[in-house]
């Protein structure tokens, strides 16, 4: 009887120890998984910044996993669906447009850099030489359309309704002396409009115009008044914006390593916003 009881006690102890070991293993696995931060991004230099932040964040015990996408939709869909923790590929007005259209709750966490945007022309070196009736390629999404029109207004090519600022649309153009014709194009396809003979001006970001071996130095004119709302920003969700992961990610994205990288490697195309 005593032997039977002793056996049961030993068996119980063994099971307790095994359970404890199992829990510890599970905890270690969970801890390891919790240290991986998935960040969706699109193309250089955004992806480069994410990778540089990945180097900076190691000292805090985290690993950044870059999830690279090939369009301007997936990175927000992945974040909305909780398949990634954050993304880095857009400015806040573009994010807000996605929120309103998709009933999403994305949140801009930190501005990282302002891209040097402007208009490019294959055929003209001076604004005065642009003939009447010329076609102008601008983005077909509201947030970038308003920015493009504001730049044209600053150059005196058009006038916009008072007070619209960067929120204007082509319906808000009140004066168009050169009778410019609007060619509204998806942001990713604007570069292709540059080579079209009947297009005099093309709005673009350094990231996209680079495929034509052009830089902001080649622009006919650049944005004069930089609005920080258009800074390319780190974006998370309302439900995870205050998490340890996002706090660590924000710290890494605004680290000296990232700032030095932006200033040394990309000063021709952008300006740090932190």
Image (cartoon, helix red, strand yellow):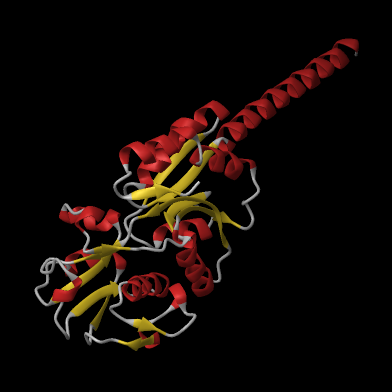
The image shows residue 253, relative to residue 153, as above or below, that is above
At horizontal 23% and vertical 83% (from top left) the residue drawn is 180
Task: Say if 215 sits above or below 127 in the image.
Answer: above
- Residue 189 lies, in percent from the top left, at 24, 66
Whole-percent x, y for residue 201 in the image: 20, 71
Residue 122 in view (yes/no): yes
Q: Nearer the viewer, residue 204 or 106?
A: 204
**In this image, 32 relative to 18: left or right?**
left
Q: Is residue 84 visible?
A: no
Task: Give the residue displayed 55% in from the left and 66% down from the top.
Answer: 104
Query: Of all residues shown, which one is farthest toward the top?
Result: 3
Query: Quick one: 28 or 35, which is closer to the camera?
Result: 35
Q: Is residue 128 left or right of residue 79?
A: left
Task: Note whether 152 is above or below 77 in the view shown.
Answer: below
The residue under the point 40% across, 86% down is 172
Give residue 154's quadrant in the image. bottom left
Q: Nearer the viewer, residue 143 or 270?
A: 270
């Amino acid at each position: 009887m005593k032997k039977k009881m002793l056996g049961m006690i030993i068996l119980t102890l063994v099971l307790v120890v095994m359970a404890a070991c199992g829990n510890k293993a599970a905890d270690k696995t969970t801890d390891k998984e919790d240290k991986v931060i998935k960040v969706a991004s699109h193309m250089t230099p955004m992806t480069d910044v994410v990778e540089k932040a990945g180097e900076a964040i190691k000292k805090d015990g985290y690993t950044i996993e870059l999830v690279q996408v090939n369009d301007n939709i997936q990175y927000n869909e992945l974040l909305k669906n909780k398949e990634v923790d954050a993304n880095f590929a857009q400015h806040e007005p573009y994010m807000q447009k996605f929120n309103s259209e998709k009933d999403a709750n994305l949140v801009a966490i930190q501005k990282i850099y302002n891209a040097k945007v402007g208009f490019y022309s294959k055929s003209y070196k001076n604004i005065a030489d642009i003939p009447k009736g010329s076609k102008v390629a601008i983005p077909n999404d509201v947030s970038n359309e308003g920015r493009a029109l504001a730049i044209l207004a600053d150059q005196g090519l058009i006038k916009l309704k008072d007070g619209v600022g960067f929120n204007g649309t082509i319906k808000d153009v009140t004066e168009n002396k050169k009778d410019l014709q609007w060619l509204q194009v998806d942001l990713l396809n604007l570069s292709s409009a540059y080579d079209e003979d009947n297009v005099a001006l093309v709005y673009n970001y350094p990231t996209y115009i680079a495929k034509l071996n052009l830089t902001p130095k080649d622009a006919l004119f650049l944005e004069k008044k930089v609005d920080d709302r258009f800074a390319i920003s780190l974006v998370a969700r309302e439900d995870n914006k205050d998490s340890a992961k996002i706090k660590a990610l924000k710290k890494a994205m605004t680290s000296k390593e990232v700032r030095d990288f932006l200033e040394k490697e990309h000063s021709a195309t952008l300006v740090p916003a932190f």
